[in-house]
Structures are given as structure tokens and as C-alpha cells.
């Protein structure tokens, strides 16, 4: 198994480190345009392998030759948010970066699965899908896993219970209009409506939607990377080990959930073929309306790609 991580910033480097620590691949290639950065970080990580007991080999490079024949490519490259910025503010710059990265990576790894982490996530997944020309089951955006993790963490804080006992889904775009689903959220099988007031549920939903900017405002010069990297690696692991995990991921929708030609987060089964199945759950009228509104936000940004000269 060979995995390439594109972008040697905080998210990319932490992703490469997690893959190596978990020994999910024999080889991890870290790619970045900045000379010396991927080489130095990869060497530093490789020198920790004797300590942690992993035989994963790490390579840092500024070109794509050494990424050839990768099984999975994880794209984290792009600008990070700063205070006062929305994910959509990154659209033009990151679309060009992700398109270039995807085209170069697929040229030497035509059979790879692509996991996209760059923001704005849903639009960047669309960009990668079009740039690679791969089928939609092989280009998957990491968003719902992260958003659901934040949602679960906040519920854990509220109820003082183990995060392991909390199951939750967050659908829609990775932005302010994402759709946490309290009706499908349980603690050890108990609906959260049995454990907290509607007021507290609404507050947690609001905090989940603003989970990214909350961290950006704390850091001031960067954005989250521990949880995003863990979420991407969880997705990669489900593909590598054919675990068939049911995870909320951003994929191209073609009629599912009454949505067409838009990338949006929905529950999917992730296995050896990437997206093995889109899991259709029955939404209430209000939940469907929220999902439609979230998808409309994504569609609006996808439409801007032509004006920006991306496609």
C-alpha cells in the first residue's frame, strides 16, 4: 500500500504522521511546492519510526515522480483560513491549487482513490473529480466525519459521557449551512432529546456549524489540523482495510437525496471500492429543506468556477 499526501502544512504533515504511526501503508510520500519542507518533515517523521515501532517508509518531495502508483492520494494543499474569513473566501486560489495537484497526481497514479481535505471542501472535491476524470466512487471529500466528530465532542462535553457511546450524522456542505441531525443522534442508543433540552441541542448544533471558525479565532494564524487529519485517515483506513464503515462523506450526488450535479455530505459505505453505497435515510420536510439550502450554497460556488476560469 502506498499513500501520497499532497501539502506538507499542518494538516498534511499530521496526516502523513498518523498513517505512518498506524502503519496503514508501506510507503507515504509527502509532496509540497516549498523546497526542503516535505523532505525535512518526512525525514523527521521517518526517524521516529524506530521509536513507535512502525516500518512505514516516508519520503518528501517537490515533484510527483515519486508518488507514482499510489493507492490513495490525500489532497490537503491550499491556503488555510484566518480570522474573519469564510471557507468560501479561499475558493479561487485553492481551486487552482487543487486542480493542478489532482491533475499531476492522477497522471502517475491513475488507479488511486482521492480523499480531499482542502477548503472549501465540497467545491474542492468537485474540482478534483473533474480534474482527475475518475468515477465518483473514487473521489471523496472529508467533511462529514470531521463535522460529526465535533458534534459528538460537544455532546460529550455537555453530558459528561464517553465519546464512544455517541453516534451522530452531519449532512450537507462543509460550511455554516451544514445539517447536523439531532433526530439521528443517540447516546448508547438513547435519543439525545431524552437527555437534554431542545435549547441545549440547538446550542450544540450552532457550535458544530461554527466549529472550524472557533478554532481559527483561537489560533489566529491558522486553522484546525488534528481533527481534520484524523478524519481523513479514518476514511483511508476504511478503504484500505475494506471495513465498510458508514461515514458521512462529500460525494457527487446524481439524484440521491433529491440533489443533482452537486457535491454534498451524505452517509456512505466506504470499502475497497471507495464509495460502495450511498445510504439513503428518510428526512423530514424541514431536514430536506436544510439539506437543499446547504447544497444550494455549494452549487453557487461551483458555478463560480467557470467565471474564475477553472473549467
Image (spheres, rainbow, N blue to C red):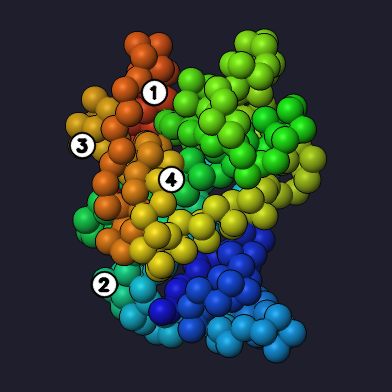
Which residue sits at x=29%, y=32%? Answer: 280
Farthest-out residue, front: 189
Question: For this rendering, which residue is in front, 208 or 94?
Answer: 208
Distance from Cα at disc 3 to Cα at disc 2: 23 Å
- Contact (CB < 8 A) between labels 1 and 3? no
Q: Give the label on residue 140, or none.
A: none
Q: Can you say whether 255 is above or below 133 in the image?
A: above
- In the picture provided, is 84 more to the left or to the right than 258? right
Mark pair 1, 2: CA separation: 33 Å
Quadrant in the picture for residue 14: bottom right
Residue 146 visible to an observer of this rendering = yes
Q: Earlier in the sequence, mark 1 or mark 4?
A: 4
The spot of residue 61 in percent (x, y) is 53, 81
Secondary structure beneath label 4: strand
Q: CA distance from mark 1 to mark 3?
A: 15 Å
The residue carrying pointer 4 sits among few (fewer than 14), some (14 to 19) or many (20 or more) residues within 10 Å by Cα, namely many
Q: Sequence-wise, which precedes: disc 1 or disc 2?
A: 2
Name above or below for residue 139 compared with residue 297: below
User: Are the residues at dot 3 and dot 4 in contact (C-beta closer than 8 Å)?
Assistant: no
Q: Quadrant of the N terminus?
A: bottom left
The residue that label 3 is drawn on is: 254
Please tell me which residue is depicted at 43% across the width and 85% down the height of the picture: 66
Q: Is residue 112 above or below residue 146?
A: below
Mark 2, secondary structure of its residue: loop
Q: Residues within 10 Å of mark 2 (few under 14, many from 20)?
A: some
Residue at 68% across, 38% down: 153
Find disc 4 in the rendering and name its residue.
247
What distance separates the C-alpha of mark 4 from that of mark 2? Answer: 25 Å
Q: Which residue is mark 2?
A: 110
Q: Are marks 3 and 2 in contact (CB under 8 Å)?
A: no
Q: What label sits on residue 291 in the rendered view?
A: 1
> Answer yes or no: do the residues labelled 1 and 2 have beta carbons within 8 Å?
no
Amino acid at each position: 500500500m502506498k499513500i501520497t499526501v499532497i501539502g506538507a502544512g499542518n494538516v498534511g504533515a499530521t496526516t502523513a504522521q498518523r498513517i505512518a504511526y498506524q502503519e496503514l501503508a508501506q510507503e507515504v510520500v509527502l509532496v509540497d511546492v516549498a523546497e526542503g519542507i516535505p523532505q525535512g518533515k518526512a525525514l523527521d517523521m521517518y526517524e521516529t519510526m524506530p521509536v513507535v515501532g512502525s516500518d512505514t517508509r516516508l519520503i518528501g518531495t517537490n515533484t510527483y515522480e515519486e508518488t507514482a502508483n499510489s493507492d490513495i492520494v490525500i489532497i490537503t494543499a491550499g491556503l488555510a483560513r484566518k480570522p474573519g474569513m469564510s471557507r468560501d473566501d479561499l475558493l479561487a486560489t485553492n481551486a487552482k491549487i487543487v486542480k493542478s495537484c489532482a491533475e499531476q497526481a492522477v497522471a502517475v497514479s491513475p488507479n488511486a482513490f482521492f480523499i480531499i481535505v482542502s477548503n472549501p471542501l465540497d467545491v474542492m472535491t468537485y474540482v478534483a473529480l473533474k480534474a482527475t476524470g475518475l468515477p465518483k466512487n473514487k473521489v471523496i471529500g472529508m467533511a462529514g466525519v470531521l463535522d460529526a466528530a465535533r458534534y459528538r465532542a460537544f455532546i460529550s462535553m455537555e453530558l459528561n459521557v464517553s465519546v464512544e457511546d455517541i453516534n451522530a450524522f452531519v449532512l450537507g456542505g462543509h460550511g455554516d449551512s451544514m445539517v447536523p441531525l439531532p433526530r439521528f443522534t443517540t447516546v448508547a442508543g438513547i435519543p439525545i432529546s431524552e437527555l437534554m433540552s431542545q435549547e441545549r441541542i440547538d446550542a450544540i448544533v450552532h457550535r458544530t456549524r461554527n466549529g472550524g471558525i472557533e478554532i481559527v479565532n483561537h489560533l489566529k494564524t491558522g486553522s484546525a489540523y488534528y481533527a481534520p487529519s484524523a478524519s481523513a485517515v479514518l476514511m483511508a483506513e476504511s478503504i484500505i482495510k475494506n471495513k465498510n464503515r458508514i461515514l458521512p462523506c462529500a460525494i457527487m450526488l446524481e439524484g440521491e437525496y433529491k440533489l443533482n450535479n452537486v457535491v454534498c455530505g451524505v452517509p456512505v459505505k466506504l470499502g475497497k471500492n471507495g464509495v460502495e453505497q450511498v445510504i439513503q435515510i428518510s428526512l423530514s420536510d424541514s431536514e430536506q429543506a436544510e439539506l437543499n439550502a446547504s447544497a444550494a450554497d455549494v452549487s453557487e460556488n461551483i458555478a463560480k468556477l467557470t467565471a474564475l476560469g477553472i473549467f
